[in-house]
Amino acid sequence: MADTTLLEIDHLKAGYATKAGFVRAVDDVSLSLRRGEFLGIAGESGCGKSTLAYAIMRLLRDSARIESGRILLEGTDLAGLDEADMNGYRWTKLSMVFQSAMNALNPVLSIEEQLVDAVLAHRSIPRAAARDLAMEMLELVDINADRFSSFPHQLSGGMRQRIMIAMALLLRPDLLIMDEPTTALDVVVQRSILQKIQELRQRLGFSVIFITHDLSLLVEISDSLAIMYAGKVCEYGPSRELYGAPAHPYTKGLMNSFPSLTGPLGRMSGIEGQAPGLIDPPPGCRFAPRCALAEPRCLSGDPVLAELSPGRACACVRCGGSL
């Protein structure tokens, strides 16, 4: 199962049309995900992580759109499906846990109503059977049955987030996308939620795309890591390898932004400057204006991902990335 490719993103471009021009928040991204794999995507705010997630789910609306590329789920190109066909995939084949559970849950409906309605929207089964399915999933995420009739405001942030996880897994999808699901939760609740995700993944066998700006969190829980900067993937590989020996200067900068829990005390160093605008990004490597190791050639050509080892790639001329 782990050797079977579930999702393949092929040269995907997506973004937002504005009066000033098209903001290409996802610019020629290619990634693959195996069955049962946990893929972490990290990067600064505004680097395109959430846009990528919404593009995979086909939830880009209004001025947002997919420009080109393919999103292959078990060989089916989701980018080419009409809305009716895509609705047949959402929540049954792939689902998403959004960043703010309180905003995602309807404040005037009970947890029971929302979970049962989610089942009935995608399956033609009796309401009693839908209710039993919802109760079963709540038990899996450690929510007591007496909370089934509660409203969102009556629950803690950790409970609401576990309910969102239960809702996303109701119909046993093959892929679960999580967009910063632990934001604004304290570290103890974060830990319990991450442990629950890992436990459910082992039990149910689904794959995970986990999006966050917290790289130290991803290293611990993910199998593979993709580092995004200014709409592009600049480094990709197994989590432990990437953490132990980051190749791209941007990845190294992210690593240096988090204090070590062991060893001698050292001065923290961030990344100076800010990410470029995505309407008209500068020529060459997009990280070059902030990179202390930039060379003249970095300003003239955009490096592409080059394979460093099996399953490991980096988009930098210093690690073999061609311009």
Image (tube, rainbow, N blue to C red):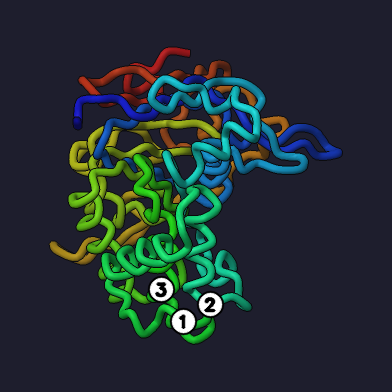
Mark 2 belongs to which amino acid? Ser
Q: Residue at x 34, y 40 (%)?
A: 174
319 to the left or right of 127: left
Q: Are marks 1 and 2 in contact (CB under 8 Å)?
A: yes
Q: Are marks 3 and 1 in contact (CB under 8 Å)?
A: no
Q: CA distance from mark 3 to mark 1?
A: 23 Å
SS for tag 2?
loop
Which residue in the rendered view is the most extreme toward the left?
A: 263
- Most foreground residue, 253 or 72: 72
Query: Residue 311 placed where, x, y %?
Result: 25, 24
Eye-nearest disc, 3 or 1: 1
Mark 1 belongs to which amino acid? Ser
Query: Residue 285 placed where, x, y %?
Result: 52, 26
Please determine whether, in this image, residue 321 is positioned above or below residue 81: above
**Residue indicated by mark 2:** 110
- Quadrant in which residue 133 is drawn: bottom left
**Residue indicated by mark 1:** 149
Q: Residue at x 58, y 31 (%)?
A: 85
User: On residue 230, which mark appears?
Assistant: none
Q: CA distance from mark 1 to mark 2?
A: 6 Å
Q: Residue at x 63, y 78 (%)?
A: 108
Query: Residue 127 placed where, x, y %?
Result: 47, 63
Mark 3 belongs to which amino acid? Leu
Taking the image as drawn, is residue 205 in sight? Answer: yes
Q: Residue at x 62, y 31 (%)?
A: 14
Which residue in the rendered view is the most extreme toward the right?
A: 19
**Residue indicated by mark 3:** 185
SS for tag 1?
loop
